[in-house]
Amino acid sequence: MSEEVSFVLDVGEDAMKKAISHLEVELGKIRAGRATPQMLDGLVVDYYGSPTPISQVGNISVADARTLTIQPWEKNMLQPIERSIIGANIGVTPQNDGIIIRLFLPPLTEERRRELVKKVHAEGEQSKVAVRSIRRDAIEDIKKLQKNGLSEDAGKDAEKEIQQLTDKYITLIDNYLASKEKEMMAV
């Protein structure tokens, strides 16, 4: 196999790995009945005029299975953190006692679990679309190489390898989705 073909395959596989790690991050943000600090990833607070992640303005910790606590490093950040959480609409109301903010996560209802499973499947579908798009780009690159002198047999072999990579990563996505769904539907 030529150097160009192996380069196309390596680039494609790296991009597919990135799609999987993005999926892992997104699935971590979806709560499955337990409190995790990752639930607040992506939430930003107005810190002296600049948007700053909540994790950089205070300490986020898990008090118990259904309670998160946020202790800001500066007392005047309590209100902006509280507003950010309310504005994010994550399904919890912050309790501010003047020192720390507590987030009491209600138990998930069957209906809410089903909504979250739909969200998980939507994230998985986005990842599958990304993997298929990477496959399409890699196959286009192989076809360009064929026009520039790569043999037809080598091109077909490379396309077959790209398809095998795609199948492998689609199966991996399906496995992540199945385990997350099982975790979410467990009471």
Image (cartoon, helix red, strand yellow):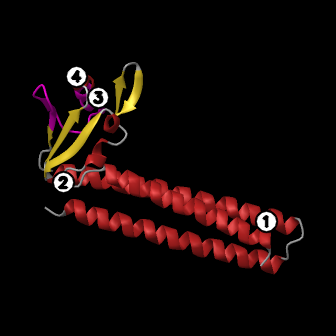
Which numbered marker is on residue 53? none
Q: Position of residue 141 (x, y in %)?
A: 75, 62
Q: Which image quadrant for residue 132?
A: bottom right
Sequence order check, earlier mark of 4 and 1: 4
How many C-alpha atoms fall within 10 Å of the one at disc 2: few (<14), some, or many (≥20)? some
Count neighbours of disc 3 (C-alpha within 10 A) and say few if under 14, some if 14 to 19, many if 20 or more.
Answer: some
Q: Secondary structure at mark 4?
A: helix
Q: Which residue is mark 1?
A: 143
The amino acid type of the residue labelled 4 equals Gln
Viewer-side residue, 74 vs 61: 74
4 or 3: tag closer to the N-terminus: 4
- Classed neighbour count for the residue bearing mark 1: other residues with Cα under 10 Å, few (<14), some (14–19), many (≥20): some
In the image, residue 127 sits, relative to residue 182, either above or below, namely above
Q: Measure the alpha-carbon separation of dots 3 and 1.
A: 49 Å
N-terminal of the pair, mark 2 or mark 1, is: 2
Quick one: label 3 or label 2, which is nearer the N terminus?
Answer: 2
Query: Residue 93 location, x and y as percent?
Result: 16, 33
Q: Which structural element holds mark 1?
A: helix
Amino acid found under the numbered disc labelled 2: Arg
- In the image, taking residue 126 as reference, residue 155 lies left or right, namely right
Residue occupying the point 28% across, 46% down = 39
Q: Which residues are magenta?
A: 81-102
Q: Which residue is mark 4?
A: 79
CB contact under 8 Å: marks 4 and 2: no
149 in magenta: no
* Residue at image mark 3: 84
Residue 37's x, y, as percent?
26, 47
Q: Residue furthest front?
A: 73
- Report which residue position mark 2 lands on: 34
Above or below residue 105? Residue 5 is below
Depth check, mark 3 against mark 1: the one in front is 3
x, y percent for residue 54: 32, 35
